[in-house]
Amino acid sequence: MNKVYNNRAWWLILPMLLLVAFSAIIPLMTVVNYSVQDVFDAHTRFFTGTEWFKEMLNDPSLHAALLRQFAFSLIVLAIQVPLGIGIALIMPKSGWQASAVLILVTMPLLIPWNVVGSIWQLFTRGDIGLMGWSIRELGYGYNITSSPVDAWATIILMDVWHWTPLIALLCYSGLRSIPDAYYQAARIDRASRWAVFRYIQLPKLTNVLVIGVLLRFMHSFMIYAEPFVLTGGGPGSSTTFLSQSLVTMAVGQQDLGPSAAFSLIYFLIILLVCWVFYTAIMNMQKDKNQGGV
Amino acid sequence: MAQITLKSLAHSYSPNPAGPEDYAIREMNHVWHQGGAYALLGPSGCGKSTLLNIISGLLQPSDGQVEFDDSVVNELPPEARNIAQVFQFPVIYDTMTVFDNLAFPLRNINTPEDKVRQRVAEVADILELTPLLKRKARNLTADEKQKVSMGRGLVRDDVSAILFDEPLTVIDPQLKWKLRRKLKEIHERFNITMIYVTHDQLEASTFAEKIAVMYEGQVVQFGTPRELFETPNHTFVGYFIGSPGMNFLEVAIEGEHVVSGAVTLQVTPRVKSAVGRARSANVKLGIRPEFIEVHAEPVEDGMEARILSSQDLGTYSILQLRLGDITLKARVEEDQRIPRDKAYLRFPEQFLGLYVDEYRVELEHE
């Protein structure tokens, strides 16, 4: 046998390599580069090892921001997921009403983040904002610039308004894909409305819900523009979330080393939570008695 | 336990049906007796699934009545009719175990838990699902799933009828046979009315005592598999049942003879007078390929035909024949001598059917 060795085919992976380099490796490595050095100017830099990481992990203001961030994401998920499912269940299934409702529901998703922040900033003003003014007229001293509770409630309400439609749309498409025979069989089995939801609709929604919850978790964990425009992180630092702390550090104070270390930690937290969540859901679906009895 | 009666039943999906072609089910009267095993056989789109859904109550008929025993159930939803339905694709509750699936219809009517356990154990035993009871239903194979959905129909002891809508579509061929046996066994044991929709004549005839053949929204014949084979009531039944289907020759009287196109047919005087009596332009004689007498040598009253092809199917052969300008199929058993090129055909009178306007007419008319 005469085998000709020709390794020129390796060049064919070059485009892929370039693509991955520009999309992931180069930007990420820049951050890694900064996170282990202290950079003064273009020519002066010192290797610092894990120092920035230690500093970031021990920073109490970041601990607070991290806790706030988790609280925010969990509250938002706890409201949006059930609400989204509920909306999907009552949305009309056919005819012009279905199209009309679909467009109405989708609307908030099309608005850019900082525009959402501006809209709510105006909406909640005590003097000219419809919501702010109405609540004050009802006798409650609503003020997002002085009351942390008001600020939190407003940010959550804003996020629910902006992103519940995503869950609703995902669930709506999930519900549409359930064959009629399931509902017919359930009627013949005399299942209650609740049983139909619990044993037919919810199981068939699991897949879209996994996607929905992952997306919403990542989104909400990275939230920046809306609270920044609405409250600026205040009152005090009560609505300062992780990304805002990061921007203040990186852009405001030009602390490139610490903020690079912080970015990596931030990224790893999101990765870890998503992995844990995904694994948990997939395990729930597994059959404990699989492979014989 | 119930007798199901359809009284001048008709159904149209359009709100203002103009003619008979707008009807998925054309007006029919039919009785399904208590405890019978029936099949509803017909090609796709003939209305058999529509009819099944009307019986189960998933669909409201636009005309006529559905009666269970003596009460009209038109207005009753499926849950109030005490029927069970098994669908084309297995419907199971994914997240439940097999046990919970089977228990579901009982728990929905608040059956005491010890009764539930007892019934589920019984049904699981018959369906051979006992080893699977603790498994999650989503991990079962298609035939196991279909047995589970069948089982959900059997657990309620007040079920009056089980309706099957092509339940073996997704089952592997070697398992189909087993499942059909199971169905028969269940039928014998429980004495439940069963109606089985299918487009497969073999499935219908192995399962059912009586088959209703549907064509264009009508039941064109209701009879035992043997009756459908030997005396099809309608040309469609002739075509549809049997493999290959029945031969039909358009006939007319010309002078002293019965002719089909340019061919003079050798038939008995009784057939001839029956053809002569028919007051229609659409008169056909039908004969099954199995019943055509094929001779290699000239015989008395034999009609000479050319052999176009012969297909050997093991224990028998199918001959394609040309009689004048008519193409016929005939079945020849393996012990018979298969002629070459030329054959002499006879149509025995007892196997010859006369069809006027597509419906069978008896020969004996005085």
Image: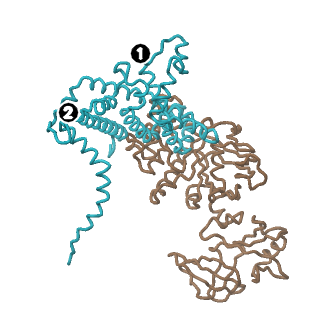
Chain colours: A cyan, B brown
Furthest residue in direction top, as rendered: A139
Residue B93 image point, x, y percent: 47, 40
What is the quadrant of the C terminus of chain A in the image? top left
For the point 50% across and 12% down, the residue is A140
Q: Pointer 2: what residue? A: A53
Q: Pointer 1: what residue? A: A147
Q: Amino acid at mark 2?
A: Phe
Residue B212 image point, x, y percent: 66, 56
Q: What is the chain identity of the residue bearing mark 1?
A: A
Residue B204 in view (yes/no): yes
Badge 2 element: helix
Residue A277 image point, x, y percent: 34, 36
Residue B98 in view (yes/no): no
What is the quadrant of the N terminus of chain A in the image? bottom left
From the viewer's perspective, is B172 left or right of B223?
left
From the viewer's perspective, is B18 left or right of B197?
right
**Depth order, front residue of A35/B247:** A35
Is A122 situated above or below B84?
above
From the viewer's perspective, is B96 left or right of B79?
left
Is B288 situated above or below B152?
below
**Splitting the image into 4 quarters, where does residue B130 fall?**
top left
Residue A228 image point, x, y percent: 40, 28
**Depth order, front residue of B288/A6:** A6
Q: Earlier in the sequence, mark 2 or mark 1?
A: 2
